[in-house]
Structure formats: structure tokens, C-alpha cells
Amino acid sequence: MSGKSDYSFILASASPRRKELLRCAGLHFKTVPADVDENYLEGESPRQHVKRLSAAKARVVAEKYPEAWVLGADTIVVIDDMILGKPAAKTQARNMLRRLSGREHKVLTGFTLARVASNVFQTKAVQSLVRFKTISAEEMQWYINCEEPYDKAGGYAAQGKGACFIRSIKGSYTNVIGLPLCETIEILKDCKVIHFR
């Protein structure tokens, strides 16, 4: 598989997880983080939320680089119709783990591919279901004492220490990390951003 040059394909995200996933797929790209308001809008469904934010991120960067293909994405964790953000402190991280413990939750990622010069703007959303085991108080304390929970939606990393809490995943595993790689590669291939040789 080959991709365009670094400056013709841009990831509109600073997420190290998304960068690593794209690199693992053999893609070459430039990273230009998009600064957008990520607040939830009243009456907005979780799926609408991630699609809107991924589109906003892609649009902001695509307008600066009209000849480039720009990929924007946004991932959220949802349980009891509540979006769990990124915990800022141990208390928040513990509360999130308590809510997720022994239960199933949703992980949704919206992703958008945009190119202003070609008038291309495609947005999709992918959902995975993740079931956690019952987490003991000792395990919670151990986890919130490490650095991992504090820049992750839902307060855990499926590709890190948080994997020991995951009983099962229905759907895309890479979606839980932050980007549904299978679906992303498909849209990149359909738009001829990448080629399989």
C-alpha cells in the first residue's frame, strides 16, 4: 500500500493513538491538530456529536490546505446516555471506572475525509461495544495512580494497562483505540488517497 506525500495527506489530530494506527498501516502524513470547540450541543445524539466534531476538525485544517486530503476524527465513550470525557483528576477517573465496572458501554468514533480542491467531504461514524469486568477497589487505585487514564476518553486505554479490564469487544478494536482503521482505509482507498500495489 502506498499513500500520498506527507503534505498531501494530513491528520487533523494530535492523538498519538491515531498517529500510531495510521503509521502501522504504512501511511505517510503530516499532523496538523485542529482547535475546535468540543462541547456537547443540547439535543445532540452521541453519533451526531462525533460526526459533527470530526467534520469541524477536518474542515478547519482543509481550509488552510485546500490541496491536501485531511482526516479528522473524534472518539467518545458513552454509558447510560452519558458521554464520559477525559478525567482531569483521580476522583473523576475513579468515578468513571466505577460507572464502567462490570458493564457494557459504547465507544463511538466519527471520522471525516475532506479535500477542498476536489469538493470532497465524507463523514462516517463507527460504534463498538466494550464490556468491562468488575474492577476491584485495589485495581482502580492502581490504575488511577498511573498516568494512562488522564488523556483518554472514558478514562482508560484499550491498548495499554486498561486492556486488563476489558472482558469483550463487539465491533472494531481500533475504533476503541481512537480510529476505526478498516473503515478509514476503505474511504481513503475509495477516494484514491491510497493505492494497494
Image (cartoon, rainbow, N blue to C red):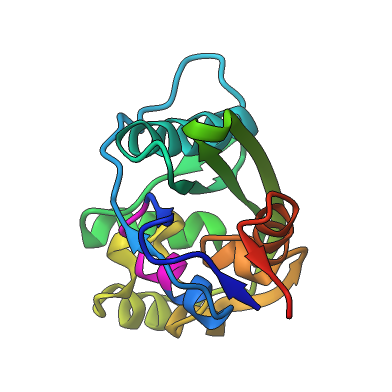
Q: Residue furthest right?
A: 170
Residue 93's quadrant in the figure? bottom left
Q: Is residue 183 left or right of 50 when viewed as pictured? A: right
Decide which of 138, 13 is in the foreground and name it. Answer: 13
Q: Is residue 1 left or right of 51 when viewed as pictured? A: right
- Quadrant where the C terminus sits is bottom right
Query: As displayed, is residue 126 above or below residue 148?
Result: above
Residue 6's quadrant in the figure? bottom left
Q: Residue furthest top?
A: 43
Q: Is residue 187 left or right of 100 when viewed as pictured? A: right
Query: As displayed, is residue 93 above or below residue 59?
Result: below
Measured as percent of width and height from the top left, residue 56 is found at 43, 30
> What residue lies at 67% left-to-right and 71% top-to-bottom?
173
Asked whether 17 falls inside the magenta stretch, the response is yes
Q: Residue furthest left?
A: 89
Q: Which residues are magenta?
A: 13-19
Query: As displayed, is residue 104 above or below residue 47?
Result: below
Residue 25's quadrant in the figure? bottom right
Any part of residue 102 in sight: no
> What residue lies at 47% left-to-right and 60% top-to-bottom?
98
Decide which of 179, 107 is in the foreground and name it. Answer: 179
> What residue lies at 52% left-to-right and 28% top-to-bottom?
52
Asked whether 59 falls inside the magenta stretch, the response is no
Measured as percent of width and height from the top left, residue 178 is found at 51, 61
Measured as percent of width and height from the top left, residue 143 is found at 35, 78
Query: As displayed, is residue 182 above or below residue 44?
Result: below
Any part of residue 14 in sight: yes
Total number of numbered labels?
0
Decide which of 111, 6 is in the foreground and name it. Answer: 6
- Quadrant where the N terminus sits is bottom right
Measured as percent of width and height from the top left, residue 182 is found at 72, 66
